[in-house]
């Protein structure tokens, strides 16, 4: 990929019916937010930045937005 973002220690929402830990079977805690890891978590960061740039510069093309992200 041309652009990537952090995918480690990302604060994310979690459905309240799921246990707080995916690794411990007896964990009965329920939380609304958790810290998760994974490369797929970089996509929301880049999408958010694209949205902010598109809102600030509605006349910019996708190539201009990509260039702005890659050169800053």
Image: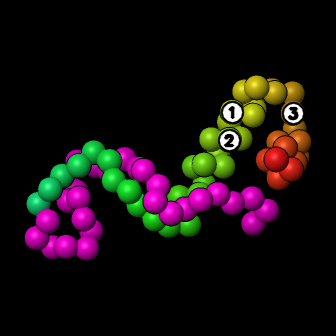
Marks 1 and 3 in Cβ contact (< 8 Å): no
Mark before the other along the chain sequence, 1 or 3: 1
User: Residue 72: x percent and y percent?
Assistant: 82, 47
Q: Is residue 20 above or below residue 63?
A: below
Residue with the mark numbered 3: 60
**In this rendering, would 4 be left or right of 41?**
right
Look at the magenta stretch and give its main secondary structure. loop
Per the model, the C-alpha gap separating discs 2 and 1 is 5 Å
Crowdedness near tag 3: few (<14), some (14–19) or many (≥20) residues, C-alpha within 10 Å: some
Q: Nearer the viewer, residue 34 or 50?
A: 34
Q: Is residue 51 above or below residue 35?
A: above
What span is in magenta? Answer: 1-27
* Residue 58 lies in quadrant: top right
Crowdedness near tag 1: few (<14), some (14–19) or many (≥20) residues, C-alpha within 10 Å: few
Residue with the mark numbered 1: 52
Marks 2 and 1 in Cβ contact (< 8 Å): yes
């Amino acid at each position: 990929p041309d652009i990537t973002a952090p995918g480690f220690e990302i604060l994310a929402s979690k459905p309240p019916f799921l246990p707080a830990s995916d690794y411990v079977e007896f964990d009965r805690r329920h939380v609304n937010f958790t810290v998760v890891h994974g490369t797929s978590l970089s996509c929301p960061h880049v999408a958010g930045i694209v949205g902010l740039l598109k809102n600030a510069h509605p006349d910019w093309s996708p190539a201009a937005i990509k260039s702005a992200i890659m050169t800053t």
